[in-house]
Amino acid sequence: MKIIGLSGSTVGSKTRTAMEYTMNIVTKKFPDAQTALIDLAEYDIQFSDGRNFMEYEGDTKYVAQTLMEADAIIIGTPIFQASIPGTLKNIFDLLPVDAFREKIVSILVTAGSAKHYLIPEQQLKPILGYMKAQIVQSYVFIEEKNFYRKEIVDDDVLFRLDRLVEDTIELTETYKSILDKKETQYDF
């Protein structure tokens, strides 16, 4: 099972911090899983211009191809101006419309205040649904007050991250089992 963490911003540290915690949980609880954390701040991603994702080069091709090869993706995003960052939207634009078919996608969000808690419901989930993702319905919303010196200091947030990982893995395994069962129906 290949699980990719995607930190969807080029600025700030809270989303990256939360994604590191999350991916550490994945590697500790599920050591057999292949994992990688893609932090968009570390890559030079081109703007989407409508080409097939395989026609891009360098970092852009690497990120797109890595996401396409994943079984599960944990997306971490900050909320800026009551919206997801353009860098994350650009990643979605680089990929084909059915890029997340047969993939499990879960979400964690960092925000400056509780006022933005519905942004994942109103913006992110519709995009993921359109791209055919199987979405883990419960996402983790983390406020600025839950961080101190680049660490998560709220035990409830840590518990919810742990649960998010468990739900993601469980749904991935269940969905793979369903697909495998469906595949055995064909005799070629």
Image (spheres, rainbow, N blue to C red):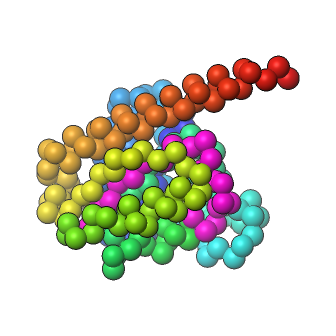
Q: Nearer the viewer, residue 123 or 99?
A: 123
* Residue depicted at 30% across the width and 38% down the height: 163
Q: Is residue 53 left or right of residue 92?
A: right
- x%, y% of residue 118? 31, 64
- x%, y% of residue 13? 30, 65
Farthest right residue in view: 188
Q: Is residue 146 left or right of residue 168?
A: left
- x%, y% of residue 91? 56, 65
Instruction: Quadrant for residue 182, please give it.
Output: top right
Instruction: Tell me, yes or no, whether the highlighted magenta stretch contains residue 106.
Output: yes
* Residue depicted at 50% across the width and 28% down the height: 174
Q: Quadrant of the N terminus?
A: top right
Residue 81 drawn above or below residue 117: below
Q: Is residue 135 left or right of residue 146?
A: right
- x%, y% of residue 61? 67, 60
Q: Nearer the viewer, residue 54 or 83?
A: 83
Farthest bottom residue in view: 81
Q: Which residues are magenta?
A: 92-112
Can residue 16 be seen here? The reply is no
* Residue depicted at 35% across the width and 29% down the height: 29
Instruction: Tell me, yes or no, whether the highlighted magenta stretch contains residue 71.
Output: no
* Residue depicted at 66% across the width and 54% down the height: 98
Q: Nearer the viewer, residue 48 or 107?
A: 107
Can residue 58 be seen here? The reply is yes
The count of marks equals 0
Q: Is residue 143 left or right of residue 130?
A: left
Q: Quadrant of the C terminus?
A: top right
